[in-house]
Amino acid sequence: MSNTLNHLLDRNVAWVDRKTADDPDFFRRMAEQQMPRYLWVSCSDSRITANDVLDLDPGEIFVHRNIANVVHSSDMNILSVLEFAIEGLKVEHVIVCGHYGCGGVRRALANERSAMVDHWLQPISMLYLKHRAVFDAIPDEAARIDRMCEINVEMQVRRIAATPIVEKAWARGQPLHLHGWIYALHDGLLRDLGPHLSAIEEREALPSIDHRVLHPAEAVSAIRRQALDAFSALEPCC
Ligand code: CO
């Protein structure tokens, strides 16, 4: 067996051929500058790639991914990405996109304590331990994990909204909208869970994350509405 990755390099050449056949100027434009309007923060899971699920070209979305899309206020990586996206690229939207069936969230609920990743997942496991009775009352394990996947999206949107980077952007009047989405692996569809935050006052007006845990019906109804919208949008129009 070869230890080179020529099959991938061949795919790259084929991709370049396809791109330039459709659009001869594509790579010249890419080389000049990027002007993404969106920053995408999602899980490292190999099944959720921003450009694919949003059907966007390179250059259209700036991306940060980590296990279970967690935002740590001491993580230089995400803070650098956030700062450059907002202050340098002037993105207008930051999308935190979790996914159902997230292995990181599953591990956080299993309350493992044996690896580096368990430190990483600590914000999720701490929320779980605080509301263990609520989560454990969901009898189906997959549903329990999915519920935490939803809550985790909202928690991370709030954490981004709490960064001085975002606060400064809002304070100087820069248009900046935060979104919480979730992706379903089984159908490829995105659901808009919220919260949508465009100002410090909106962040301050949110009920607590504990309230969200204790009142799941609010979030579930939003998900169902979004799912229905998504399905109806798929109906052929003519
Ligand atoms: Co995941």
Image (cartoon, rainbow, N blue to C red):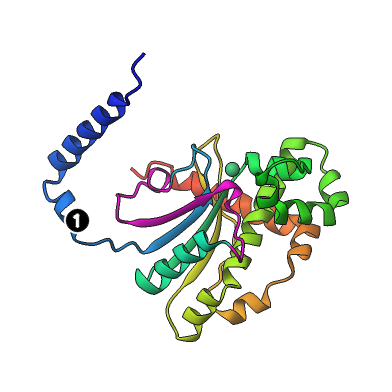
Tell me what residue is drawn at x 40 percent, y 68 percent.
84
Q: Position of residue 79 (x, y in %)?
A: 51, 65
- Which residue lies under the disc numbered 1? 31
63 is within the stretch colored magenta: yes
Residue type pointed to by label 1:
Ala
Q: Is residue 171 above or below residue 30?
A: below
Q: Position of residue 128 (x, y in %)?
A: 79, 52
| Element on which disc 1 rests | helix
Tell me what residue is drawn at x 71 percent, y 59 percent.
218
Q: Is residue 227 above or below residue 21?
A: below
Of the pair 55 and 156, the residue shown nearer to us? 156
Tell me what residue is drawn at x 61 percent, y 77 percent.
202
Position of 173 compared to 164: left or right? Answer: left
Quarter of the rendering containing residue 38: bottom left
Range of the magenta residues?
Answer: 50-74
Position of 24 compared to 126: left or right? Answer: left
Q: Residue furthest bottom?
A: 172
Q: Is residue 216 above or below residue 235?
A: below
Quarter of the rendering containing residue 31: bottom left
Tell me what residue is drawn at x 14 percent, y 46 percent.
23
Q: Quadrant of the N terminus?
A: top left
Q: Quadrant of the C terminus?
A: top left
Q: Residue furthest front?
A: 3
